Amino acid sequence: MSFKCDTPAVPTVEIDDDAARITRWDFEPGAATGWHTHGWPYFVIMLVDGVLKIHDGKTVTDVPLKAGQAYRRPSGVEHDVMNGSPHPIAFVEIEVKKPEMLK
Amino acid sequence: MSFKCDTPAVPTVEIDDDAARITRWDFEPGAATGWHTHGWPYFVIMLVDGVLKIHDGKTVTDVPLKAGQAYRRPSGVEHDVMNGSPHPIAFVEIEVKKPEMLK
């Protein structure tokens, strides 16, 4: 179901308040987050160019992204994310815990 | 009230849907956004190290930030933002238009 990988991606929580959790994720080449689900809707913002390998439980998709490129995903979708690039990558993940608090 | 500046920051809209608008902003040294207010709550995510000069109408504050560092601000606050670094900088701005759409 998830990537066979023994190099975990490294999370660094920057902000974790009532409204949102902001985490920087650093991945060595081949590193992966491990199988997980987000309990909150979230945004991902790439800090460098790279390829994300996204495993949805059945298929693996290579997603090439540029530094500064961002996307949004809903909560509740199981997946695993691996660095498919030959170099380290990093992205920032913004999980919106309480959207109603964003004023 | 705002910075005297004739080098505007350059916005590149990446995503603009019902829920959010995601814009990459590129600043040459000394470039500024110009006096503005956000109609929606928003996040800023730095793509490179740099100093943001924030003008709130009375005072100017130098805010040194690291690549990957992010912050959140409410809507409705007038300000101007200048690149106070000796090099070009860029950040990604995520404006949450309809928080209730984030599921």
Image (spheres, coloured by chain):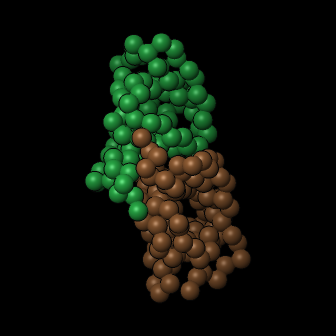
Chain colours: A green, B brown
Q: Which residue is depicted at the point 39% across and 24% down?
A: A78
Q: Which residue is depicted at the point 35% across and 57% down?
A: A101
In the rendered view, would you say A93 is above or below A87?
below
Name the residue nearer the viewer: A66 or B11. B11
Name the residue nearer the viewer: A74 or A87. A74
Percent across and percent down for residue B26 are 64, 59
Q: Point out the image quarter for the C terminus of chain A.
A: bottom left
Percent across and percent down for residue B89 are 59, 59
In this rendering, the count of numbered labels is 0
In the drawing, does residue B91 fall left or right of residue A30? Answer: right
Q: Which residue is depicted at the point 54% across and 72% down?
A: B37
Q: Visible in this render: residue B44?
A: no
Q: Which residue is depicted at the point 46% across and 84% down?
A: B59
Percent across and percent down for residue A2 are 40, 16
Q: Visible in this render: residue B34?
A: yes
Name the residue nearer the viewer: A15 or B73. B73
In the rendered view, would you say A21 is above or below A6?
below
Q: Point out the image quarter for the N terminus of chain A.
A: top left
Percent across and percent down for residue A97 are 33, 47
In the rendered view, would you say A10 is above or below B79?
above
Q: Residue extending furthest front?
A: B100
